[in-house]
Image (cartoon, rainbow, N blue to C red):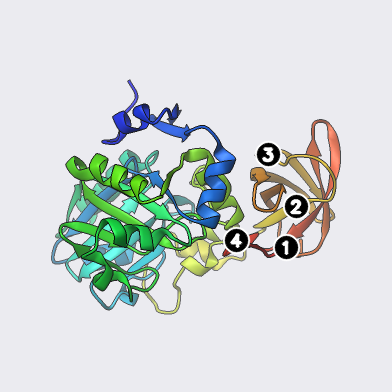
C-alpha cells in the first residue's frame, strides 16, 4: 500500500492526478503541469513535500557526528537557524543521499532527507552511531508536514496567511530559518525561485494549505517541481547522483569542504580527480532530451541523466554525464528516437529569476 501525506485528502478534493512516487501517493499535477510551472516562475506556487523525511540529531556529540557523515562542514553554521546543503558519502565517495541540515545549537540539528532514501539513510546513520559509539540520538519526525511555497510573490503570500511571521522573516536571508507560532520557516527551496519551506504540525497542514490557496498561491505537483529544478540546475537523487557517483562527478564540488583536515566519510576517494562530469545540454534542433539517452563527444561517450521540456525557455534541456575534458560550448550529439541530434554543452543553471542564462 502506498504511503500518504497529511494532505492526501486535500489533493483528492482539488482533483489532483495522483501517482506512485517512491512509494508515496503524490500529486503529479492538478490539471496543467505547464500552468503550475509558470505560476511559480511568475507569481507563487506551493508543493506538498511532506513525503520528505525530517529528523532531529540531538546529543553532546551531534556536531562531531555530522562532521564525520557530511561532506560539507557544519562548523560553518554559527547561528541558530542557519542551514547548509550537503551530501552524505559512502567509503567510495558515492552519494548516499543529499540533504539540508539546520543548526539550532551544537547539540541539536535538523536534517531533511529525500523520501525514497529515508529508511536507507536512517539505517545508515544509526549504524554509524552504533559503530563509532557517538552520544547522539536520531529521531524521525513523523508528526509534521512540509509545504514549499515558491515564487516571486511567495513570501508575501505567507505573510498574508501568517501576519506574525513578517517581522521574523522579512530580513531572513537564504539558507536561514526561524520558528513562528510553532511553525518552522526556512528560506530554502528546490525551484530556483525565492520562497519558504515550511514545517508544521501535521494536524495544521490542510488548513494552512487552503489558506495559502485563498491567498493566491497555486497548488503544484511533482511534474512542475521537476521542470523547475531542471531549469535551476538542481540535481535529483537517483537520477543525477547516486551511491555509484561522487559529488565531483555530479556538479557538486561546491558542497564539499576540504579546507581543514576534518576526516569525513568518503574524503579519501575525492582526492583523485574525477574522470566524469555533469554538464548542461541543449539541442540545436527539434527533439526532446530524456534520461538515459546516449551522448557522443570527442572525449568519449556519455549519458543524459535528466531531461525534459523547459516551459520557461520553450525548448528541451538536460543534464548529462560526460567525460572530463568536455568543455562548455562544445558540440556533442544525443541519440533521440534512433537519430543523433546536435547539442551544445552549457553550464548550470539554465534559468535564474525567470530569465534565460543560455
Q: Residues within 10 Å of mark 4 (few under 14, many from 20)?
A: some
Of residues 93 and 249, the one nearer the viewer is 249
Q: CA distance from mark 2 to mark 3?
A: 11 Å
| Discs 2, 4 touching: Cβ within 8 Å | no
- Which numbered dot is residue 354? 4
- Which numbered dot is residue 282? 2
Q: CA distance from mark 1 to mark 4?
A: 12 Å
Tell me the element at label 3. Answer: loop
Q: Is residue 107 left or right of residue 283?
A: left
Q: Is residue 239 visible?
A: no
x then y, percent, for residue 283? 79, 49
> If you read the primary sequence from the N terminus, does the residue marked by circle 2 or circle 1 appear first?
2
Of residues 104 and 25, the one nearer the viewer is 25
Which residue is at a point 31% across and 74% down the rendered structure image? 77
Figure disc tally: 4
Q: Is residue 84 visible?
A: yes
> If you read the primary sequence from the N terminus, does the residue marked by circle 3 or circle 4 appear first?
3
Q: CA distance from mark 3 to mark 1?
A: 19 Å
- Which numbered dot is residue 358? 1
x then y, percent, for residue 175? 37, 68
- Which numbered dot is residue 41? none
Q: Residues within 10 Å of mark 2 (few under 14, many from 20)?
A: many
Tell me the element at label 4. Answer: loop
Q: CA distance from mark 2 to mark 4?
A: 18 Å
| Discs 2, 1 touching: Cβ within 8 Å | yes
Tell me the element at label 1. Answer: loop
| Discs 3, 1 touching: Cβ within 8 Å | no
Quadrant in the rendering for residue 168: bottom left
Quadrant in the rendering for residue 167: bottom left
- Which numbered dot is residue 290? 3
Amino acid at each position: 500500500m502506498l504511503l500518504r501525506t497529511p494532505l492526501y485528502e486535500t489533493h483528492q478534493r482539488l482533483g489532483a492526478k495522483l501517482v506512485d512516487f517512491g512509494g508515496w501517493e503524490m500529486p503529479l499535477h492538478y490539471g496543467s503541469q505547464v500552468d503550475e510551472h509558470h505560476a511559480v516562475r511568475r507569481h507563487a506556487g506551493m508543493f506538498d513535500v511532506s513525503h520528505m523525511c525530517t529528523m532531529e540529531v540531538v546529543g553532546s556529540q551531534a556536531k562531531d557526528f555530522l562532521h564525520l557523515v557530511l561532506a560539507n562542514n557544519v562548523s560553518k553554521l554559527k547561528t541558530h537557524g542557519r542551514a547548509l546543503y550537503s551530501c552524505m558519502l559512502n567509503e567510495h565517495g558515492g552519494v548516499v543521499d543529499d540533504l539540508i541540515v539546520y543548526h539550532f545549537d551544537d547539540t541539536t540539528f535538523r536534517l531533511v532527507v529525500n523520501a525514497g532514501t529515508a529508511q536507507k539513510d536512517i539505517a545508515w546513520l544509526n549504524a554509524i552511531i552504533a559503530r563509532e559509539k557517538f552520544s547522539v540520538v536520531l529521531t524521525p519526525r513523523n508528526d509534521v508536514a512540509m509545504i514549499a511555497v515558491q515564487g516571486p510573490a511567495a513570501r508575501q503570500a505567507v505573510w498574508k496567511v501568517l501576519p506574525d511571521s513578517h517581522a521574523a522573516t522579512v530580513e531572513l536571508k537564504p539558507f536561514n530559518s526561524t520558528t513562528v507560532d510553532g511553525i518552522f520557516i526556512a528560506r530554502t527551496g528546490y525551484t530556483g525561485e525565492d520562497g519558504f519551506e515550511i514545517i508544521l504540525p501535521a494536524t495544521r497542514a490542510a488548513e494552512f494549505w487552503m489558506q495559502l490557496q485563498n491567498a493566491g498561491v497555486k497548488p503544484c505537483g511533482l511534474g512542475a517541481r521537476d521542470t523547475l529544478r531542471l531549469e535551476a540546475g538542481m540535481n535529483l537523487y537517483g537520477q543525477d547522483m547516486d551511491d555509484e557517483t561522487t559529488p565531483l562527478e555530479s556538479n557538486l564540488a561546491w558542497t564539499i569542504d576540504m579546507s581543514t583536515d576534518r576526516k569525513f566519510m568518503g574524503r579519501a576517494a575525492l582526492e583523485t580527480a574525477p574522470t566524469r562530469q555533469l554538464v548542461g545540454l541543449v539541442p540545436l534542433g527539434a527533439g526532446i532530451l530524456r534520461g538515459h539517452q546516449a551522448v557522443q563527444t570527442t572525449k568519449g561517450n556519455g549519458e543524459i541523466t535528466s531531461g525534459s521540456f523547459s516551459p520557461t525557455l520553450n525548448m528541451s534541456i538536460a543534464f548529462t554525464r560526460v567525460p572530463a575534458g568536455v568543455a562548455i560550448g562544445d558540440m556533442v550529439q544525443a541519440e533521440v528516437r534512433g537519430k543523433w541530434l546536435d547539442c551544445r554543452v552549457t553550464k548550470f543553471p539554465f534559468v535564474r529569476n525567470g530569465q534565460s542564462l543560455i
